[in-house]
Amino acid sequence: MSLIFSLMQQMSVFLVIAYLLSKTPLFKPMVNYSIRLPHKMVIYLVFSGFCIMGSYFGLGVQDAIANTRAVGAVLGGLLGGPVTGLLVGLTGGLHRYSMGGFTDLACAISTTLEGLLGGLVHYRLVKRGEMARLFSPWVAFATTLAAETLQMATILLVAKPFGQALALVQVIAAPMLINNATGAALFISMIRDQKTMYEKFSSSFSARALNIAQRTVGIMAKGLNSESAQQICRILHEETGVAAVAVTDRERLLAFTGLGHEHHRPGAAISSPLTLKAIRDHEVKFADGYQVPYACSLAEDCQLGSVLVIPIRGETCILGTIKLYEPKKRLFLKINRTLGEGIASLLAHQLLTGRLEQQQQLLTQSELKLAHAQVNPHFLFNALNTIGAITRREPDKARELLLHLSNFFRKNLKRSGEQTTLAEELEHVVAYLAIEQARFNDRLEVSFDIPEPLLGLRLPTFTLQPIIENAIKHGVSTLLEQGQIRVTAGIEAGVVKLRVTDNAGTYQARADGDGLGLSLVDKRVKCLYGTHFGVDIRVEPERWTQVTVSLPQQEART
């Protein structure tokens, strides 16, 4: 009876070691069906180690060793297959043989057979498609019981003298059969529980990720705005179970859902240093409230205690952030960190895909509209009338205007690319204005204030000309006094601003948009550079109208 308890103590040590091993990456191959060589190598090394420890920690009995070596050999074969089991058993058997004693050869043979027996059970179950039973404690118990019975028979057959071998078997058979079979069952039960936990975790993670992906499909197709951000916040809050979710662009909070919504108000400028750093550094930032302190930048009594800030990456810059919060009394789960980063990547792909589709649609529309605008009958009619009127009295001026007209249409025909430089755009505008100024005589004055370093700025073709045409057609042409148009460019807060200002102040917003020209310019700029850029119109009635085109500074080439 004392031998049973001693072996149980030894098995308890082994199970503690196995539990500690379960917290390391080495344990992962054991919870899967091991078909790859690296996995089988890990199983060989781990269970060979258990075989060797079983022999070292065994109890001396009649010039032999009562031990738990069989557990390592059987489980090595059961989890790794016949070849792995044979090698584990052979390694454990050779080690036992090196320790000597009258049962050394018998134990070496029996340990090798035990590993092979475990491997044959593995082969049989896999062939029958019952791989789940590899992790059954009952299968491990029965296989180890059979293996230990085989060991006792081998000792009786091989060990000499027979009388001493029989006496030894009578003493150690029952304790080793019961203890090792039970230990193997407990060991495999521990592996099965770990496998179940991995599967549940993986299943839960996959299901949540799939649900989020399905629910967010198409939301970002029209860009990152308040409406899409609010939908994303609601979905993430429901699926992740975090305390709060926020979505920002580069400058403002677009949406917020959850704990703290009273003071985290959409539309407010970003005040969190951590968020600004995430945007600036293009990196995920995490403040757990312990190692990295976190304090709400808006309210001292805020209950939020940790935050994960994930940038939403565009093609060339950060478009915004997703922020996941937990309260002060709850730890931030690692699964939510992983989910958050995956979600940001998913949304970024959706944004880029939506933008690409929109660009393709707009490009087709633009080509059709611009093809029509390239030979604008109204403009051509006015230009020819103007040239005809001055041909007799100012033939040189007429020839000059004809050159400007031909230059204008030549550039129209040649400018088939999506982008051009500001210098080339201005040449096109100057050719257009030369004809318009001749038509209006002294009633139209145009001035330019463009810094030379910005002449290399990249921008969509036909950006300025439609705006200036609109200012003349719907603005200064309605004035009795002299019309004035001023074209300027500059950099403000890292953004390039192109402005066209007239002194008419006659602009009125239309229910169906801002006119074909302005609307097309705005959409093309947004498609190329994002919703942070585009066309903005300000007006002081009967005084002035100012159209501003915002472009990213990084597109400027000096």
Image: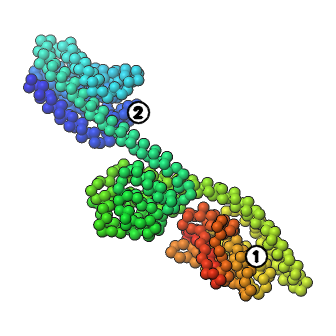
Towards the viewer: 472 or 181: 472
| On screen, residue 348 above or below 477 | above
* Residue beneath the point at 65% across and 74% down: 508
Q: Earlier in the sequence, mark 1 or mark 2?
A: 2
| On screen, residue 138 above or below 226 | above
* Residue beneath the point at 40% across and 51% down: 238
Q: Quadrant of residue 491?
A: bottom right
Coloring applied to the structure: rainbow
10 Å crowding of disc 2: few (<14), some (14-19), many (20+): few
* Residue beneath the point at 18% across and 31% down: 11
Question: Could you tell me residue 549's position as x and y percent?
Answer: 61, 72
* Residue that protrudes farthest toward the right in the picture: 392
**The disc labelled 2 sits on which kind of residue?**
Arg
Quadrant where the C terminus is found in the figure: bottom right
Q: Residue 36's mark?
A: 2
| On screen, residue 304 above or below 103 | below
Question: Could you tell me residue 165's position as x and y percent?
Answer: 14, 15
Q: Which residue is mark 1?
A: 431
Q: How many marks?
A: 2
> Disc 1, disc 2: CB below 8 Å?
no
